[in-house]
Image (tube, rainbow, N blue to C red):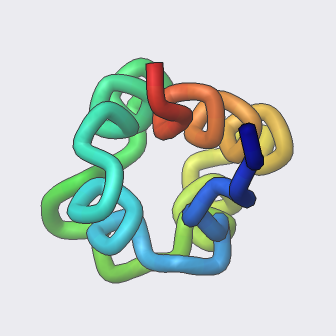
Amino acid sequence: MTTTELDLDCGWTVNDVVKRHPATLEVFNRYGLDTCCGAMLTVEQAAHQDNVDAESLCAELHAAARPQ
């Protein structure tokens, strides 16, 4: 069995992350991040704008996007 690197980068826009990994929407909502009007910001920019710890957010997004 081989493993592949998860296709998710927190330098992508919020919109791109949600499009590629719909399960991440729950994480964005839990953190209170805008997935509509602010979705053109990168995940890192959105986290900074809303005073969210980007490292924690990215870790949770990766976990949510990981295949079950």
Q: Name which quarter of the figure residue 59 lies in.
A: top right
Instruction: Please tell me which residue is depicted at 79% across the width and 40% down the height of the picture.
Output: 53
Q: Residue furthest left?
A: 36
Instruction: Please tell me which residue is depicted at 15% across the width and 59% down the height of the picture.
Output: 36
Q: Name which quarter of the figure residue 63 lies in.
A: top right
Percent from the top left, x then y, of residue 44? Answer: 67, 66
Label count reads 0
Q: Judge left or right: residue 64 versus residue 24.
A: right
Percent from the top left, x then y, of residue 21? Answer: 33, 50
The foreground one among 26 and 46 is: 26
The foreground one among 18 and 53 is: 18
Percent from the top left, x then y, of residue 57? Answer: 67, 38
Q: Judge left or right: residue 38 versus residue 1.
A: left
Above/below status of 16 relative to 1: below
The quarter of the picture where the C terminus appears is top left
Percent from the top left, x then y, of residue 8? Answer: 58, 62
Above/below status of 22 relative to 40: above
Instruction: Please tell me which residue is depicted at 32% across the width and 25% down the height of the picture.
Output: 26
Instruction: Please tell me which residue is depicted at 17% across the width and 67% down the height of the picture.
Output: 37
Above/below status of 49 relative to 60: below
Q: Residue furthest right?
A: 55
Q: Name which quarter of the figure residue 55 lies in.
A: top right
Q: Judge left or right: residue 30 versus residue 66.
A: left
